[in-house]
């Protein structure tokens, strides 16, 4: 069976050049990067080269890069690190002097669940709403900031919609208020340009497996001078911010992937966005009543999210998988959830439409033939499920 993968926001394959760069560090170059002997220093040099490569991708200094296990750890370290450093311990009373954070209602669970955990410890959190395009109102952000606000944490690109927040303006607001600003850039790094100085972010999260590096490796950018509490205790690795023996092979892979992305993302973005638009327009033309979620927002070039009224997204996902097409109903971390996507309901979709939405995310290896395949199987699968739907006929008549 021909199989087509359009779920690159969930994860990406490891690039052959990335794997080639990693392989020696599983065998001949196996030494601990903290060792002072010659093999250890070769491993150390490889780690520091990777640090330079990741820094170059986002316009940072190498010493501002901390390697982590992935996006979730990076998000947690940024959030708990800032709040813990500013207010330790956090008051359990939730009084007016408790630390305050500002985030959005459409963040990834790595941010939302961290904020909710802090609320249980007495912190206060403002969850900014978004408009139908998944974008926040900058004036609402200004009004949300209080004297006790210690952190603004807002994602760069949404994992389900691809909608890109105006980080440069958010960074300016944070700087004016003298508040730390963290951005989850897991879905934007390597897809659109990032310069941490232009965006004025103090902390920024990256995940390796979203940009053709292996799973289990990520990075956190920490601007020099940022006061950040360490979350793990052990040795003095990575200036004490993140103790533990470095995952040298994974770090080398992330560095190589960052280098490739920096050199190719302009060309990749142009080609992928053309394929994304071909898919999106083709589905809108071939599937009656379909719509794009957040289609008017600035988006990452690879992502489109469409609602197909009258079908259950999970049923459609299974039908497409049986035909050889892999896509998603939302974040991979939320697969199997009974509730509709919190992102889609937050932008105003009723639960039945949120459940009828699919995300298609393209990648570096997506071809025009892949899009042709999707344009063949998706409309047929939607039509078949609509024939079985007891409500779709009435819905179509009402329209």
Image (tube, rainbow, N blue to C red):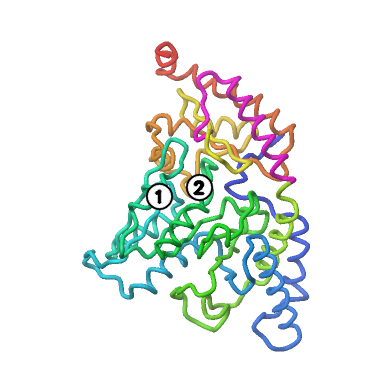
Nearest the eye: 121 or 182:
182
Are circles 1 and 2 on residues that touch, CB within 8 Å?
yes
The residue that label 2 is drawn on is 165
Residue 365 lies, in percent from the top left, at 73, 44
Which residue appears at 62% of the width and 45% of the height? 8
- Give whichever of 377, 93 is nearer the camera: 93
Q: Nearer the viewer, mark 1 or mark 2?
A: 2
What number is the disc on residue 7? none
Quadrant in the picture for the C terminus? top left
Q: Residue at x 43, y 38 (%)?
A: 344
Q: Height in image: 124 above or below 299?
A: below
Left or right, 19 with respect to 140, comes to right
In the image, residue 151 lies at what x, y percent? Answer: 40, 62
Please give the name of the residue rendered at 67% of the width and 58% of the height, measured from the top-left corner: 213
- In the picture, the quarter occupied by the N terminus is top right
Question: Label 1: few (<14), some or many (≥20) within 10 Å?
Answer: many
In the rendering, which numbered label is found on residue 104?
Answer: 1
Q: Toward which corner of the image does residue 254 lie, by quadrant?
A: bottom right
Indicate the quadrant where residue 360 lies.
Answer: top right
Disc 1/disc 2 C-alpha distance (Å)? 11 Å
Q: Position of residue 325 (x, y in %)?
A: 63, 34
The reply, left or right, for residue 373 in relation to residue 88 is right
Question: Label 1's element?
Answer: strand
Q: Is residue 136 above or below residue 369?
A: below
The magenta span reads: 267-295
Q: Main secondary structure of the magenta part?
A: helix
Q: Earlier in the sequence, mark 1 or mark 2?
A: 1
Looking at the image, residue 281 lies above or below residue 74 = above
């Amino acid at each position: 069976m021909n199989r087509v993968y359009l779920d690159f926001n969930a994860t990406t394959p490891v690039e052959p050049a990335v794997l080639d760069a990693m392989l020696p560090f599983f065998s001949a170059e196996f030494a601990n990067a903290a060792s002072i002997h010659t093999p250890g220093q070769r491993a150390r040099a490889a780690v520091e080269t990777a640090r330079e490569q990741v820094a170059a991708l986002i316009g940072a200094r190498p010493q501002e890069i901390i390697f982590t296990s992935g996006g979730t750890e990076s998000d947690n370290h940024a959030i708990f690190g800032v709040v813990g450093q500013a207010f330790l311990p956090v008051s359990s009373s939730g009084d007016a002097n408790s630390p305050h954070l500002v985030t959005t209602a459409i963040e990834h669970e790595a941010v939302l669940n961290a904020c909710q955990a802090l609320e249980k410890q007495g912190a206060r959190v403002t969850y900014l709403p978004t408009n139908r395009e998944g974008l926040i109102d900058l004036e609402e952000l200004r009004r949300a900031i209080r004297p006790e606000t210690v952190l603004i944490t807002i994602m760069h690109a949404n994992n389900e919609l691809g909608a890109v927040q105006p980080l440069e303006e958010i960074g300016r607001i944070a700087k004016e208020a003298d508040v730390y600003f963290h951005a989850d850039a897991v879905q934007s790094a390597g897809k659109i340009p990032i310069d941490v100085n232009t965006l004025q972010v103090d902390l920024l999260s990256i995940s390796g497996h979203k940009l053709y590096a292996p799973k289990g490796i990520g990075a956190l950018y920490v601007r020099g001078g940022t006061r950040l509490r360490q979350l793990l205790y052990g040795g003095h690795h990575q200036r004490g911010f993140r103790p533990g023996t470095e995952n040298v092979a994974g770090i080398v892979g992330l560095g190589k992937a960052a280098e490739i992305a920096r050199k190719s993302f302009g060309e990749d973005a142009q080609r992928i966005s053309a394929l994304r638009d071909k898919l999106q327009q083709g589905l809108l033309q071939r599937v009656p009543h379909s719509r794009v979620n957040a289609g008017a927002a600035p988006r990452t070039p690879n992502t489109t999210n469409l609602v197909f009224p009258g079908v259950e997204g999970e049923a459609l996902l299974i039908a497409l998988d049986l035909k050889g097409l892999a896509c998603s109903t939302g974040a991979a971390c939320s697969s199997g959830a009974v509730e509709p996507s919190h992102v889609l309901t937050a932008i105003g979709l009723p639960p039945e439409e949120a459940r009828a939405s699919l995300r298609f995310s393209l990648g570096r290896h997506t071809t025009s033939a892949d899009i042709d395949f999707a344009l063949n199987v998706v409309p047929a699968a939607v039509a078949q499920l609509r024939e079985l739907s007891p409500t779709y006929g009435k819905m179509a008549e009402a329209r």
